Image: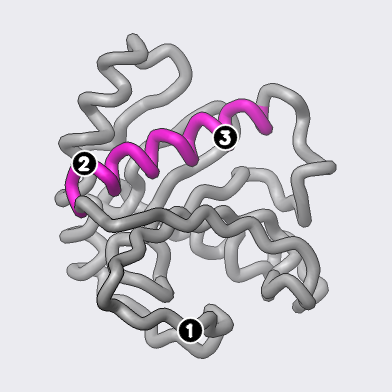
């Protein structure tokens, strides 16, 4: 894991650079976005806006917002991608696969006939901005519906 500060953290950089074309939703101190590097197409990343290494550094409200955002991303992927299963990955420390000292959750669609082998994100090719935007557009309809069903109390869908 790279010992990082907000100035050197790749997750912080992605959060700073995240424009409205790749941000799926914003919550209380958290952001759901289409990551620069994804192991599996149509995955969604969720991260706290503050630089923190793990769950133990979050305030209770931030933890609730993070968990709720994971559920929102999972519902959108299930509705629009129709995977055979989902993985929710939370890596803490290098042995578990954390590459930056910033909490990052990945919601990943999985399919029966698609082989998967864990790859460090730093070894995954970058997606183009157009690819990331297309993924957001595909998932956006379900995110809007999910938020409307919950009265939009904690989240704001990001429109272009």
Q: Is residue 34 within the magenta segment?
A: no
Whether the residues at callouts 2 and 3 have beta carbons within 8 Å, the answer is no
Mark in the foreground, 1 or 3: 1
Residue at mark 2? 79
On residue 117, the disc is: 1
Residue at mark 3? 67
Does any portion of residue 144 appear in the rendered image?
Answer: yes
Identify the residue at image location x=48%, y=40%. 70
Q: Is residue 67 within the magenta segment?
A: yes
Badge 1 local density, few (<14 within 10 Å), some, or many (20+)?
few
Does any portion of residue 8 appear in the rendered image?
Answer: no
Q: Colour scheme used in the picture?
A: one colour
Q: Tag 3 or tag 1, which sits nearer the N-term?
A: 3
Q: Tag 3 or tag 2, which sits nearer the N-term?
A: 3
- Is 8 displayed left or right of 158 in the figure? right
- For the N terminus, the quadrant is bottom right
């Amino acid at each position: 894991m790279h010992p990082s500060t907000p100035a050197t953290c790749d997750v912080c950089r992605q959060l700073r650079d995240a424009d409205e074309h790749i941000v799926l939703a914003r919550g209380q101190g958290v952001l759901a976005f289409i990551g620069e590097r994804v192991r599996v197409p149509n995955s969604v990343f969720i991260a706290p806006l503050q630089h923190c290494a793990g769950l133990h550094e979050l305030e209770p409200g931030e933890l609730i917002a993070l968990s709720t955002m994971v559920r929102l991303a999972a519902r959108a992927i299930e509705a629009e991608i129709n995977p055979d299963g989902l993985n929710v990955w939370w890596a803490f420390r290098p042995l578990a696969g954390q590459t930056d000292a910033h909490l990052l959750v990945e919601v990943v669609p999985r399919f029966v006939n698609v082989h998967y082998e864990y790859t460090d994100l730093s070894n995954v090719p970058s997606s183009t901005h157009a690819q990331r935007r297309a993924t957001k557009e595909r998932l956006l309809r379900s995110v809007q519906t999910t938020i409307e069903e919950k009265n939009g109390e904690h989240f704001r869908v990001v429109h272009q």
